[in-house]
Image (spheres, helix red, strand yellow):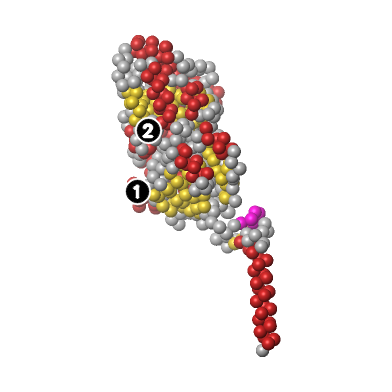
Amino acid sequence: MKKRKFLTLWLFLVLALMFVLTACGGGQTTEPSETDTTTTDKGETTTSEEPKNDVPQILVFGRGGDSVSLDPAIVTDGESFKVTENIFETLLNFGPQDTTINPGLAKEWEVSEDGLTYTFKLQEGVKFHDGTDFNADAVVKNVERWKGGAAEQFYYFHSMFKANGEDIIESVVAEDEYTVVFKLTRPQSPFLKNIAMSPFGIASPTAFESAGDKFGDNPVGTGPFKFVEWKRNDSITIEKNPDYWQEGLPKLDKVIFRSIPDNSARLNALLAGEIDLADGINPSDANIIEGNADLQLIERPSMNIGYLGLTNTRPPFDNKLVRQAVNYAIDKQAIIDAFFDGRAQAAVNPMPPSISGYNDDIAGYEYNPEKAKELLAEAGYDGTEIELWAMPVPRPYMPDGQKVAEAIQKNLADVGIPAKIQTVEWATYLDKANQGEFDAFLLGWTGDNGDADNFIYTLLDKDNIGSNNYAYYSNDELHELLIAAQSEVDEEVRNSLYKQAQEIIHEDAPWVPLAHSIPLLAAKKGVTGYLPHPTGSESLQNVSIQ
C-alpha cells in the first residue's frame, strides 16, 4: 500500500517537472520547427520552411474610404479594387511591382500574326468559391456579361474595348473546356494589358446570374480569399479560400478592411495596434513612422496623376481662355511643398513621365497670376462664384483633398475667381462627377496597366464622357489620334501619336494637372511579404504576420 502511494507521488512530481520545463521552453509546442511537416486540405504532405504559429493570421488593413461595390466589373474606384483584387482573378497578371504581363487564370497564350486573334490556355482544376468550375465557358459568360451591359454600368469594359461605337472584341469562343479564343475587329496594342486589369476579374456565372444587380454585395471569384461580410462605411471581411488552386497560398487566414477616413485617426489606430497596415499616410507623418522601431514605412511605386477637373460643358469653364487662366493661377509647387512634403513632382501632362509616349517638350503652365487675370479679362469673365468640390477621402494621388482645395480656393481668389468649397460622401462624389454636376473638382487617377492609352484615352477622350472623362472634354482631332494609337503596333509611331495628343490637351486645358505623388503606407514591423503595386491595388496572398 505504501509502495503504491510512493509511486503515485513520484509520478505526480515527474509530470509537474515536465510541465515546468515545457512552460520555460517558450511555447515551442505550438510552433513546429523548420523541418515540421503539415498535411494540406488536399491530403498532401509538405515541409515547412519557416516556423508556423497556431494563432490565426489576421490582417487589419486601415484605409481612407469604403468600397462602392465588390463587383469589379462595375466600379472605377481604388477602394473597391483593393478588396476585389483578392476575391477575383484575371486571365493575366501584372508583375509583382510593375505592369509586365504574366500568367494568371490563363497559363499561356498565343497572338495571331495579324493581331486579331488571341488564344488562351486556361489553368485546370480551378474552382469558384461557390464550388462551380472555372473553365472556358465561364470566361465566355463573363465577357458576354460585360459586352451586353450598359456602358454607364460596365465603365471599364466599354472604355477599354469599344471605340467609335464599335466593339473591339468581336467574339469570344470556348474552343474546348480549357481553351478560349478572342477575335478582335481591329488590332489593339494594349489588349493583353487591358485584359489583365482588375475590372476584368472572372466571376462565377452561377453567382452573377442568380444575384443580378446584387452580385456586388456577395461577390464570388476564384481568388485566394472568399467574401465574408460587409458593414457599410465600417469594414469588409474576407477569409482564406481553403481550396485555392495555388498550393500554400494565401498565408493569411483573414483580412479585415477597415474604413477610417481621417488620416490622423488612421495613423493613431496603427500606433495603438488597432490595425496592422495603413494606407494613405500623410507625407508629413513619414518621420513618425520612420522613428518608430515597431513600424515600417512603405512607398507605393508612383504611376498616378492628381488633378483639378474643370467641367468643360459648364460656364465659365466652357471657355478655353478661362480654363487656361485657372492653369496659370494655381501654384502647384506650393501645394506640393505644403501637402506632399516633397514626395511628389509637379504635373505637366495628364500622365506621369514614367509612361511610354510622355511628351517632355511641353513646358507646362507656370504659376503666373497676372497672366491669369489677363486671360480672364479677355474671356469676359464676370466674377461669378463657382463651386469647388473637394474629395472627402484621402487618395494615393492626393493625401488631403480638403486642404488642397483650400489652397486652390486662395489661388483662384487672388485672380478674381470666388470659389465655394463643397464636398459629399465618396460614392455620391463620384456619381455627381460622372454626371457632370460639378463646376470644378479635385480628382485623380492611378494607372491600371502602365499604358498611355489608359491615361489619355480613358480620362480625356470623348468616348468616355459619362464614365472616366469627368471633365466632359471633347476634341475630334484628339479622338482620331487616340484611336489610331490604339491600333498602332510600331512603338515609335505610337509614342509620336501620344505626344501630339498631349500638345492638343495642353492647349485646350480641360483640367489642371497638379501632381504625380509617391503614395505612402505604413505597417507593423511584423507584416511581411506586402508588395505595393503601382496600380494601387494588389493581392495579399503572400502577406503574413510574424
Task: Identify the residue shown where x is 46% and y is 54%.
Answer: 129
Give yes or no for residue 517 being in the magenta stretch: no
Q: Nearer the viewer, residue 297 or 187?
A: 297
State the mark number for residue 214. Answer: 1
Q: Please provide percent x and percent y for residue 200.
A: 45, 41
310 versus 115 height, above or below: above
Locate the N terminus by quadrant: bottom right
Q: Main secondary structure of the magenta part?
A: loop
Residue carrying label 2: 467
Q: Please provide percent x and percent y for residue 471.
A: 37, 26
- Between the residue at mark 1 and the residue at mark 2, the CA separation in whole angstroms equals 21 Å
Residue 439's quadrant in the figure?
A: top left
Magenta region, residue range: 47-52
State the SS at label 1.
helix
Mark 1 belongs to which amino acid? Lys
Mark 2 belongs to which amino acid? Ser
Task: Identify the residue shown where x is 59% and y is 57%.
Answer: 53
Q: Would residue 97 be visible to someone looking at this image? A: no
357 versus 287 height, above or below: above
How many numbered dots are placed on residues in this image? 2
